Image (cartoon, rainbow, N blue to C red):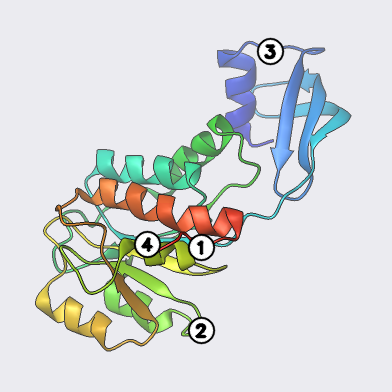
Amino acid sequence: MPAEQARYLGTVLRRTAGDTVRLFNAQAGEWLASIADIRKDKGHFRLERPLRPASTQPALTLAFALLKRDATDLVLRMGTELGVTRFLPLITERTNSHRVNLERLHAIATEAAEQCERLDIPEVCAPSPLATFIGAWPAEHTLFAAMERMTATSARTLADAREADGLLIGPEGGWSEAECQMLAKRSFVAPVSLGSLVLRADTAVAAGLALMGSGLRSGTVLSQ
C-alpha cells in the first residue's frame, strides 16, 4: 500500500488492527481484508475472501486540450467514472493552461476510481502537443473528434466505438483553422457532432464519453 494511503487509512479514517477493509486492483479484483498492522507509511493486511473478480475494462482513450485547474479536475473525475483507461492532456493553439501536476491528477483519478468502485486506475499521461499526439495515434483505431456545430455526422456514431478507440475534445474556443485542416487529413479521425449548441469543454467530455461508453460496455450500437 502506498504511504499516502496508509496515512489516510490510519490517521484520517482512524482504522486500527483488526478492522476490515476492502482492497482492490485490476489484477486481483476486490477482496475483503483485515488490518494486521497499520503505520504512518505502510500497512499489512490479511486477505479474508474475494468480493469481485478482476474484470477487463475496455480500452478507451480521452485526449483533451488542457483546461483550467478546476475544469481539468472535473474531466479526470468524470472520465474515470465513465470508463476512460488513459487520459492524454493536449497543448493546442488555444489552450488556456500549459501547466499540470501529474501526481495530483493521478491522485484525483485514484480517488474517483475508489468512489465509483472501479477496480482499475486509469493512466494519466504527460501533456503533449496536438500534432505529436496525432502523429503517434495508431491508424487502425478510430479517433472521434468533437467538432462544434458540425452537422455532417451524427453524435450517435460515437456508440459505434470499439476497443482502443479514442475521443478527442478541443479547447475552450474550439479548434483553430490549421488544427481543423490537420485533423481532416487523417483518415482515422472521425469528426462527430455533440449537437447544435456550443458546449463547455468539460460538458463535451461527459456527453461524448457517455455515448462511447454505452456501446463499449454493452457491445451494442445505438439505433439511428
Please tell me whether mark 4 or mark 2 is closer to you in this view: 4
CA gap between label 3 and label 4 equals 47 Å
Query: Who's the residue at 30% across and 46% down the image?
Result: 72
Please tell me whether mark 3 or mark 4 is closer to you in this view: 4
Mark 4, Cα crowd under 10 Å, few <14 / some 14-19 / many 20+, is some
- Badge 2 amino acid: Glu
Depth check: give the residue in front, 189 or 161: 161
Query: Who's the residue at 51% across and 34% down the image?
Result: 111
Q: Which residue has dot 3 on it? A: 15
- CB atoms of marks 3 and 4 within 8 Å: no
Of labels 3 and 1, earlier in sequence is 3
Q: Which residue has dot 1 on it? A: 221
Quadrant in the picture for the C terminus = bottom left
Tell me the element at label 1. Answer: loop
- CB atoms of marks 4 and 1 within 8 Å: no
Image side of residue 185 versus residue 216, left or right: left
Of labels 4 and 1, earlier in sequence is 4
Tell me the element at label 4. Answer: helix
Examine the rendered structure and indicate whether residue 145 appears above or below residue 169: below
Q: Which residue has dot 4 on it? A: 156
